[in-house]
Amino acid sequence: MDDHAARLTIDCSALRANWLTLDRLSGAAETGAVVKADAYGLGIETAVPALAKAGCRTFFVAHLSEAIRARAAAPESAIYVLNGFASGRMQDYVAHRLRPVLGSAGEIDAWRQRPEGAELAALHVDTAMNRLGLRLDAALSLVNTTSLADLGIGLTMTHFASAEEPDAADTRDQISRFSALQAVIQAPGSPNRAIPASLCNSSGHFIPGVPFFQLSRPGYALYGGNPTTGRPNPMQPVIRLEAPVVQILDVPAGEAVGYNGRWVARRDSRIATVSCGYADGFPRNAGNGPDHPGGTALVAGRECPFAGNVSMDLITIDVTGIPAASLKPGDFVTLIGDALDVDRVGAAGRTIGYEILTNLGRRYRRGAIGG
């Protein structure tokens, strides 16, 4: 075991509790789970079984390789691949019972060549993002003239651009556009009336009056991120990141700490150097300098500011206010956890909590609690 490695603890019971919270908000709709980006950095092999234990039966990933791993972790679940259909890999979709999310006429045509026994795909309809998906007018034409089931499609979906802003004009426009498409699909005599739909991401669960249709697909909130920007976080924290102290130095007033001397001691100071850095996925921009207050760590139960830049393998922390007897080399400080949630850590690093999660490093000593 690497004694210098920071340790990452994943609380599977909190992960399940977050899914159950969102499932209650979904009402009669099924609640899925987005486990792309290696389950937002927690690990597919850890997160998927925990979510399945809570009752989740439908998972979404970005890449085919992630889908194959998710299938091994959830043998009986539905697994969708968000980033389209890799037509040269048809045998993998069939062998692993995977469902591509189709976003173009070319992908739809390619999926029509699927062999018997293939799973039903999803149709991604673009209602605002101009990123992935069939444009709304093309989707309306398709559902007006074609049986989606004959094309191998068993779900329609769209993706919010600004769900964290429930009153944003584009959010309401997207709800209206997708609802109009569903009205056509569900019209009397339509061959597509049995095709379910999916709209809500994490923040979508908290939009007043939002239609859930038949399936929601939360992601960020499952892992402890706040889906209600500017309001108290309704989710439980899922990860804790702690780093060991390597050395504690006395730094006289007026001397600089770290690369480029961006932090200068205003008083005689004690600086703890901990073994974690941007090579571990902790944001380099969380450094403390004259133009940015930067990050903090919980040391012996108190918040202490970073001192200078976050470097590749190390972070320096001003622990002058911590009694010397309360901290020694080998002790651990908390970089993510308790009051330092992923959103706050993201803001301190001039990024977002999503990036904090998905960059969780490979060098951590990982452990899971809560089964």
Image (tube, helix red, strand yellow):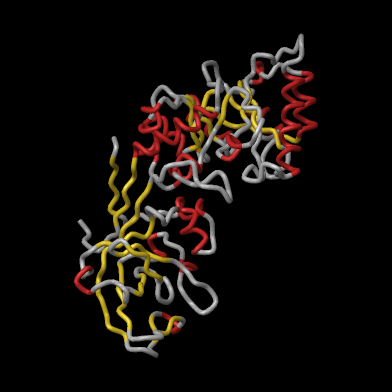
Question: Does 356 appear above or below 182?
Answer: below
* Quadrant containing the C terminus in the rendered view: top left
In the rendered structure, the answer to whether residue 328 lies left or right of residue 191 reads left
Residue at image location 52% in from the left, 73% down from the top: 292
Q: Quadrant of residue 121?
A: top right
How many callouts does the rendering have? 0
Residue at image location 23% in from the left, 69% down from the top: 327
Residue 19, x across and y down, in percent: 45, 33
Residue 165, x across and y down, in percent: 66, 45
Residue at image location 75% in from the left, 43% down from the top: 169
Residue 253, x across and y down, in percent: 36, 89
* Quadrant containing the N terminus in the rendered view: bottom left
Question: Does 98 appear above or below 310?
Answer: above
In the rendered structure, the answer to whether residue 159 lies left or right of residue 320 reads right
In the rendered structure, the answer to whether residue 51 lies left or right of residue 216 reads left
Residue at image location 39% in from the left, 34% down from the top: 16
Observer-nearest residue: 267 or 221?
Answer: 267
Question: Does 78 appear above or below 162?
Answer: above
